[in-house]
Amino acid sequence: MKVSVGHGLSGAEKRLEERGISRRHFMKFCGTIAAAMGMGPAFAPKIAAALTSDKRPSVIWLHNAECTGCSESILRTAAPYIDTLILDVISLEYQETIMAAAGEMAEKALQDAMKKPYLCVVEGAIPMKDGGIYGMVGGHTMLDICKKVIPGALATIAYGTCATYGGVQAAKPNPTDSKGVDEVFPKATIINVPGCPPNPANLVGTVVAAIATVVDKKPLPKLDDLKRPVVFFGETVHDKCERLPFFEKDQFAPAFNSPEAKKGYCLYKLGCKGPYTYNNCPTKKFNPLDKGVGVNWPVQAGHPCIGCSEPKFWDTMSPFYEEQK
């Protein structure tokens, strides 16, 4: 019924060895997470202790109104790979897309997971109109399921723009009155990790940091005014873009098939929203290889940033292929 058993059980060191994960490799991963969260290398042993602690919380992953693209993104994580992530790094007790259980057994898995301390990851917006009847799972509204799970979570990570701000579900005219998690549960402890989809590294870092925070009783990572981890969302896409030198020289591509575009000229005149978008896409990139380093991202591939990690981007950033006014 469970997806994993995780390091939290006895014999964690032996389990690591059996899966071919050396202590050195594990500590390197913890050091990478510590650096990514701006904690410094000295925090790596604390992350390792948290991930192998029997006191660490499990993770419950809820699906609301979404396309499952955020799950698809995390399934492609490479540092660590998804099997290592859910079997050896976190204890993922409930996730409808990848868990084996279905029907009543799946519902029981959720109830069992809620009997002990847990973190909650939410993917998708919450339909609110008419009592939430436009989003149902197992005969229950997504709203009711969230009401049962989120208030009891040690912290809730809204993963993806639909969960953080409502996303495309909340785009005008928003017929289902879909909302982001923070808007529906303003008193809950929320961490927003937006993106359509987000970079999987941003979620892995946030979840691991949250686990370490709970076990070590430390404050949560520093968040901005939209409750996003500053370490991931502290700078604009524009600030780190490889096309920035062309922007500063007023060298803009006039068309996607132009010689200028092929030479790497700035895409601002073609609708790029990078100057208004906070995210680490240019530095983390997507489609990671074995070492977790991404190989590409939209602007590098010749497509303008559409501002997908910003509130109401579907309405405020469109038309996507026109210069922002």
Image (tube, rainbow, N blue to C red):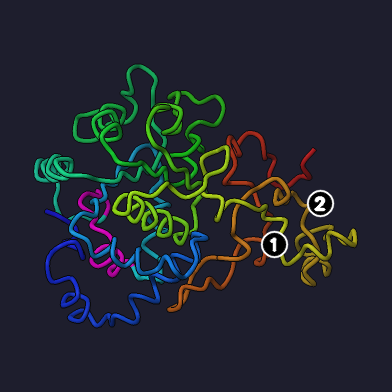
Which numbered dot is residue 269?
Answer: 2
> What range of the chain is rendered magenta?
82-97
Above or below, 221 relative to 39 = above
Badge 2 crowding class, 10 Å Cα cut-off, few under 14, some 14 to 19, many 20 or more, is some
Mark 1–mark 2 distance (CA, rounded to whole Å): 18 Å
Q: Residue at x 54, y 24 (%)?
A: 173
Q: Residue at x 31, y 28 (%)?
A: 143
> Decide: marks 1, 2 in contact (CB < 8 A)?
no
Q: Secondary structure at mark 1?
A: helix
Left or right of 270 on screen, residue 41: left
Which numbered dot is residue 240?
Answer: 1
Above or below, 176 relative to 14 = above
- Residue 32 x, y percent position in the rendering: 45, 70
Q: Residue at x 29, y 53 (%)?
A: 215
Q: Which residue is at the far top?
A: 130
Q: Secondary structure at mark 2?
A: helix
- Residue 28 x, y percent position in the rendering: 40, 76
Does 149 appear in magenta? no
Q: Amino acid at mark 2?
A: Lys
Left or right of 235 on screen, residue 229: left
Count of all numbered marks drawn on residues in the image: 2
Q: Amino acid at mark 1?
A: Lys
Q: Nearer the viewer, residue 107 or 151?
A: 151
- Residue 77 x, y percent position in the rendering: 40, 66
Does 91 appear in magenta? yes
Quarter placement of the C terminus: top right
Badge 1 crowding class, 10 Å Cα cut-off, few under 14, some 14 to 19, many 20 or more, is some
- Residue 20 x, y percent position in the rendering: 24, 83
